[in-house]
Image (cartoon, grey):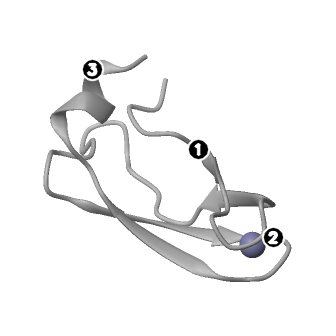
Amino acid sequence: MSPVAESIVCVECGGPAGLLTGFPPDDPPMPGDIVAYRCADCMERFDLVVDDADLEDD
Ligand SMILES: [Zn+2]
């Protein structure tokens, strides 16, 4: 199970924004890492910083 969301809602248009950054199972994202998403509708890119709350929320 991914410790970060595989998709988010685009803040620009409300469309689905998918995770661009892949993480191998033996190198999971850590707090402070950057994960990138790209919107399928408007192609806007979003870079989010992983925090502890993200990693605890599954
Ligand atoms: Zn969008």
* Residue plotted at (81% across, 60% down): 15
Whichever of labels 1 and 3 marks the residue nearer the N terminus, that label is 1
* Residue plotted at (46% across, 63% down): 21
Q: Secondary structure at mark 1?
A: loop
Q: Quadrant of ligand 1?
A: bottom right
Structural crowding at the residue carrying mark 2, measured as other residues with C-alpha within 10 Å and reported as few (<14), some (14–19) or many (≥20): few
Quick check: 32 left or right of 49? left
Q: Which residue is mark 3?
A: 56
At label 3, the amino acid type is Glu
For the residue with label 2, is its CB less than 8 Å from the closest atom of ligand 1? yes
* Residue plotted at (20% across, 43% down): 51
Q: Which residue is mark 1?
A: 6
Q: Which residue is mark 2?
A: 40
Whole-Å distance between the Cαs marked 1 and 3?
15 Å
Whichever of labels 1 and 2 marks the residue nearer the N terminus, that label is 1
Q: Position of residue 48 (x, y in %)?
A: 36, 62
Whole-Å distance between the Cαs marked 3 and 2?
27 Å
